[in-house]
Image (tube, coloured by chain):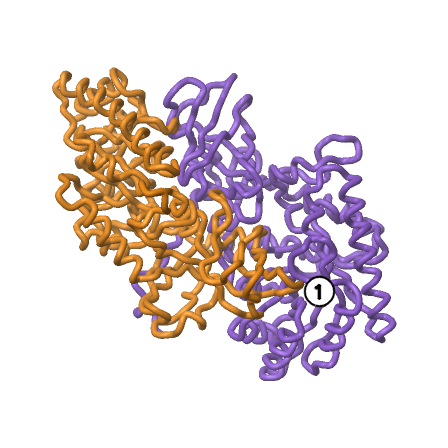
Chain colours: A purple, B orange
Amino acid sequence: MSDSAYRDQPSALPPPASVGIPLAEVETPALLLDLDAFEFNLRSLNETLSGRKVKVRPHAKSHKCPEIARRQIAAGAIGICCQKTSEAEAFVRHGVTNILVANEVVGDYKIRRLAQLAKSAAMGVCVDNATNVRALELAMAEVNALLYVLVEVDVGTGRCGVQPGPQAVALARAVAASPHLRFAGIQAYHGAAQHLRSPQERADAIRSACDKVRTCVDGLTAAGLPPQIIAGAGTGTYLHEADSGLYNELQTGSYIFMDADYGRNLEADGKPVRTFRQSLFILSTVMSRPVGGRAVVDVGLKAHSVDSGMPGVADLEGARYLKASDEHGVLEYTSIEPRLGQKVKLIPGHCDPTVNLYDWLVCYRGDRVEDIWAISARGAFY
Amino acid sequence: MSDSAYRDQPSALPPPASVGIPLAEVETPALLLDLDAFEFNLRSLNETLSGRKVKVRPHAKSHKCPEIARRQIAAGAIGICCQKTSEAEAFVRHGVTNILVANEVVGDYKIRRLAQLAKSAAMGVCVDNATNVRALELAMAEVNALLYVLVEVDVGTGRCGVQPGPQAVALARAVAASPHLRFAGIQAYHGAAQHLRSPQERADAIRSACDKVRTCVDGLTAAGLPPQIIAGAGTGTYLHEADSGLYNELQTGSYIFMDADYGRNLEADGKPVRTFRQSLFILSTVMSRPVGGRAVVDVGLKAHSVDSGMPGVADLEGARYLKASDEHGVLEYTSIEPRLGQKVKLIPGHCDPTVNLYDWLVCYRGDRVEDIWAISARGAFY
């Protein structure tokens, strides 16, 4: 149907900054990327993995930004992961041609669009259900293209994925028997392990995941279907997967940004994680200073996600982000009194759903806006 | 600067439905509006206010949708409220010409844009700071237009707003002394009262707010500045403000939609509130059924806001939305086993930040999509 059948159209806001201006002149709320920290994180991932035989396929659900995907691939990544067909479409449109949808795709329309993508890009997908395998084969046969498929195994998160063992083998057989699907291996992401605070807890969780993965590998190998790809890992645990001798494709996503939640993870010395630096911030403005000790900023629930707690305050000593309402954040301060109109940088509690609220990423170095990147897959959740 | 200076552009997704299709064919996640319930809510607000001398200026921060604003005005509203300059811009662009920004606007660029709007629409704004009053006057003088101004008073929420009494009077004087600002009255919204569960608690909270408002009215009247407008009220308390003999402009927003949080408010008989019906839903798809008792839907943190708790499950008896991750929601079910691909309607925990995640509202009646409305002020948070 034509667009004219809808009442009105969505509006995209212009960027909150232009290249070259100082940070103090950026409109708020704005999503900021500290380019020095971002580039440090890109390098740090490679350096910590140096000498290990693993490939990196970063998860683009964290950033939804074509320019970041390009830079990750330029830094050595073999491609990216997405979670949704429409995210993958946005990245293919912007020149990314090697994408794993690290998730199940269910529903005829979504599957048909995935099949279309596979005609011009190397596409993979995860499955945890035989009915879904049949639907994928049908759609791929229609376009006469090939899709590689990972069987998702639940290694401890309790979300999607078959149980390790015979279920995984049976599903891999169903995939392998489908002429337009290629069984490629196992998706074994342990999401619940990423934010365990102590390094020992995270190591134990991945050791337990590896036991489940090994059960699958043994069963698949015995069935004549040895998995080529064993994929998973996140920013909290990726070195354990890299050292496991099992996982060979790492799907870290948040490492480029970090957030307040990841900032609470500890390293072996009991200090907060330092492998990656905080590069993602929300710029806010003090819009009210109603009484002493309280300031209100213009960043509320529509400008950050509180699912993992309130944001941190990056550059106002002694201040704490106390509570959020739709368009407001209440700061409590003790030492430095912020002035009306002052810009305050916040550290998002959880990067992924926060990034998804913004159309633009304002990239800066030092105090100057250096570039502006579109978050082109913002809202791409079909 | 020209658009070509940015890396890529934001993409707006096409609507997840077309007019005339059954709900079962709508792409997910989708934001649904039950038109029967929505129209009931529009009527119910008017019916409950019948005979009371109050005006209605609904808060458009809840819906961000021009078509809903038009229908609210057609139903008798005198205009709308917004929270942000860019929201107001979106509504003015779509023909709404009477807007109160029920919030402080701080920062030169935002104020200049507000001033521009006042040249073609009747615009109001709130203030709680004399420095801000001077900045507003300066900008309005530059465009030689008039802005009406409400002094925001903190009546119990502990967010923005001056303290009732001399502070409010002093600020009103500053406004009245500004040639391009017109002092019009008091903004006295008690946000913290809206979700008190018992009707007695809500009544008590508004009684306390009214004491503070009366202090202001007396002080302002004595100073020769009797307030014409006394504005405030939300969906949880609006009848108390309407009956107060003080408030004369009501700013209810959520009443058109309702959400799981408002659904926990009780009426005098101890039963959940019935004045308004749930009209807003999120349509999800069961994308995984990994083990008995657990189903995973494709609606996670990027498709609803969890700040007020998990969403309710509207149409799958015995099921509960247990936890959300970025793109997944885990349902626990006891009685009816959902099939893979089944569509499940969810009741958002909090309507405002959930609506802000979507570009389109899929409007249905019975089982059929009847219209598709753009959420044109989605993401308009500058």
Q: Position of residue B355 (x, y in %)?
A: 40, 52
Q: Is residue A233 left or right of residue B61?
A: right
Instruction: Classify the position of the N terminus of chain A by image quarter.
Output: bottom left
Instruction: Say whether residue A245 is visible.
Output: yes
**Could you tell me which chain the residue with mark 1 belongs to?**
A
Instruction: Say whether residue B105 is visible.
Output: no
The quarter of the displayed image where residue B368 is located: bottom left
Report the front residue among A365 and A220. Answer: A220
Q: Which residue is mark 1?
A: A162
The quarter of the displayed image where residue A138 is located: bottom right
Report the front residue among B147 and A19. Answer: B147
On screen, residue A115 above or below B87? below
Which residue sits at x=27%, y=28%? B207
Q: Position of residue A356 (x, y in %)?
A: 51, 51
Q: Position of residue A31 (x, y in %)?
A: 50, 42
Residue lying farthest to the front in this orientation: B269
Q: Is residue B134 left or right of residue B337?
A: left
Q: How many marks?
A: 1
Which residue sits at x=73%, y=39%? A275
Report the front residue among A366 and A205. Answer: A205
- Check disc 1: other Cα within 10 Å, few if <14, some if 14-19, many if 20+: many
Which residue sits at x=16%, y=27%? B227
Q: Secondary structure at mark 1?
A: loop
Q: Label 1 sits on what residue type? A: Val
Report the front residue among B325 and B259. Answer: B259
On screen, residue A130 above or below B228? below
Which residue sits at x=57%, y=52%? B322
Q: Is residue B297 left or right of residue B277?
A: right
